[in-house]
Amino acid sequence: MWMMLGANDRFHFFTQKPTDLEGECPFTFAEKPCPYGLACRFGGTHKDGNSKENMDAQKEDSEVNVLKKDVQKLLWKNNMKFPKSNAALKQLGLVVWTESLKLSLRLFSSCLVDG
């Protein structure tokens, strides 16, 4: 990405970037490519900068979390069940999102829109 930016854009980025933090970048310390690249707050400790090889290695190492379609649909429709989370919330004395609460909220919101 940084290769595509002009020199003026990079200059503007670095004038706005906060100063680096003390210490060494944990990714470069572990001899891994830093996923933050030039935006890393430990950027001064990067040995190889943001070379094309570093960017390619970063793409190969990047983690991708993919949800199955049925799980996505449940989440989109707000129908996913979270029994462990609900039990923990109930134990803490916090409100648990239930079907009756959903219905009450829908009725309340429709009264606001209509009235």
Image (tube, rainbow, N blue to C red):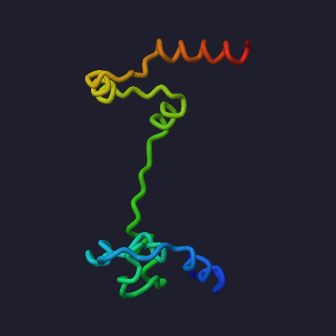
Question: Looking at the figure, which quarter contains the C terminus?
Answer: top right
What is the quadrant of residue 8 in the picture?
bottom right
Q: Which residue lies furthest to the right in this view?
A: 114
Label tally:
0
Where does the image place residue 25, in percent across and percent down from the top left? 33, 75
Q: In this view, does 14 lie to the left or right of 53?
A: right
* Residue positioned 42% across, 56% down in the render: 64
* Residue positioned 28% across, 25% down in the render: 92
Where does the image place residue 71, in percent across and percent down from the top left? 45, 35
* Residue positioned 56% across, 74% down in the render: 16
Of residues 23 and 105, the one nearer the viewer is 23
Q: Can residue 88 be seen in this view?
A: yes
* Residue positioned 39% across, 26% down in the render: 81
Q: In this view, does 86 lie above or below 17?
A: above
Q: In this view, does 104 lie above or below 67?
A: above
Where does the image place residue 58, in percent across and percent down from the top left? 42, 72
Where does the image place residue 1, in percent across and percent down from the top left? 57, 75
Q: Is residue 4 visible?
A: no
Q: Is residue 76 above or below residue 48?
A: above
What is the quadrant of residue 106 in the picture?
top right
Of residues 34 and 113, the one nearer the viewer is 113
